[in-house]
Image: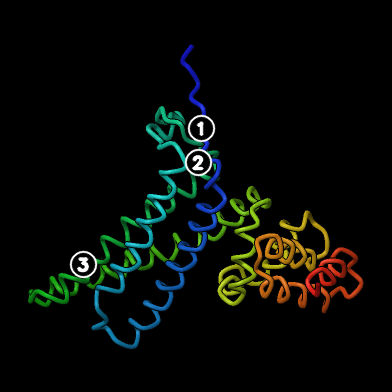
Amino acid sequence: MPEKLEVKPYLHRIKHWKIRNMVMLYLEAREQFKNYRRSLKKDSNLSFEKLKNISDILFEIKEDHHLLYKRVLNPRKKKFEKAQKFTPDDVETEFMNNIGLLFHKVMAAREIKYIMEHYVEESVTFQKNLEDLNFHLNRIENLFDQGIKILKQLISRNRDNILLLTYFLENRELTQKCFGNEISELFRLFANNKDVSEVYYLAARFYFQNGWKDRAQTALKELLKSNPEHPEGKQLAARLQN
């Protein structure tokens, strides 16, 4: 029987941070792509560099994922590399697959756009390149839409990740753009299905414990605005005054 390798302690320590970072970068890449497509409709000469930025972000997510999780050697047989890393579950594997497809599709679109910008070709070839570019851009958009659904499952599995919660609270506008009306349900996951206002207490407590009093006060303000009688919130507010 093969020896089971233990996960490196270092990876246990950084796991929450890396997951937070991957989610942050994914939402950033998606937002940049959405902006790129909107801008491209107004200006067809938009530089391929915009796509390069997105591919760089996706590459960073790939690297973070490979740092934490074992690489898949055979996806059909669910065979992973032998390494002192976490073994990804189905959702984590699906997320990595989504990232990989996005990365390569963005790279392909980037190369097509580069050719269109820097080389003169026959009109028929140019038209074919344009069709290929639009095909890849549509595929990328679909992959990002699928990725948001995967992220919801990933978030559910990481509801104890306070770094992830505080990222969402600190970037409420972008979070709302990506998850729409389901944002309350996501917050409720972090609050163990209690009232959504509970997430502000969790954030305030985390900030207070780490010495970020201004952030703690901001979170408490939101908490007590929606739930003025929250007992732990009132206690924490009193401690902040001392």
- Find the distance from the CA under tag 2 to the CA under tag 1: 7 Å
User: Of discs 3 and 1, which sits in the foreground?
Assistant: 1
Mark 1 or mark 3, which is nearer the start of the sequence? Answer: 1
Question: Which residue is labeled 3 in the image?
Answer: 112
Residue 168 is left or right of residue 232, and the answer is left
What's under tag 1, amino acid-wise? Val
Q: Quadrant of residue 206?
A: bottom right
- What residue lies at 90% left-to-right and 65% top-to-bottom? 231
Is label 2 in contact with label 1 (beta carbons under 8 Å)?
A: yes
**Which residue is nearer to you in this view: 237 or 32?**
237
Q: What type is the residue that disc 3 sits on?
A: Ile
Residue that carries the numbered disc 1 in the rendered image: 7
Residue 179: image x %, image y %? 60, 68
Q: At 15% from the left edge and 74% from the top edge, which residue is drawn? A: 126
Which corner quadrant of the image does residue 70 belong to? top left
Specify the amino acid type for callout 2: Leu
Q: Which of marks 2 and 3 is in front?
A: 2
- Residue 47: x %, y % from top left: 24, 78
Q: Which mark is residue 11?
A: 2
Q: In this view, does 52 lie to the left or right of 185?
A: left
Give the mark nearest the N terminus, 2 or 3: 2
Name the element at disc 2.
Answer: helix
In this picture, is 40 found above or below 219?
below
Q: Describe the element under mark 3 as helix, strand or loop.
A: helix
- Report crowding for label 1: few under 14, some 14 to 19, many 20 or more residues within 10 A (C-alpha): some
At label 3, counting other C-alpha atoms closer than 10 Å, the crowd grade (few under 14, some 14-19, many 20 or more) is: some
Residue at x 42%, y 35% (from the top left corner): 75
Cα–Cα span, label 2 and label 3: 38 Å
Q: Residues within 10 Å of mark 2 (few under 14, many from 20)?
A: some
Q: Nearer the viewer, residue 128 or 3?
A: 3
Disc 2 to disc 3: CB gap under 8 Å: no
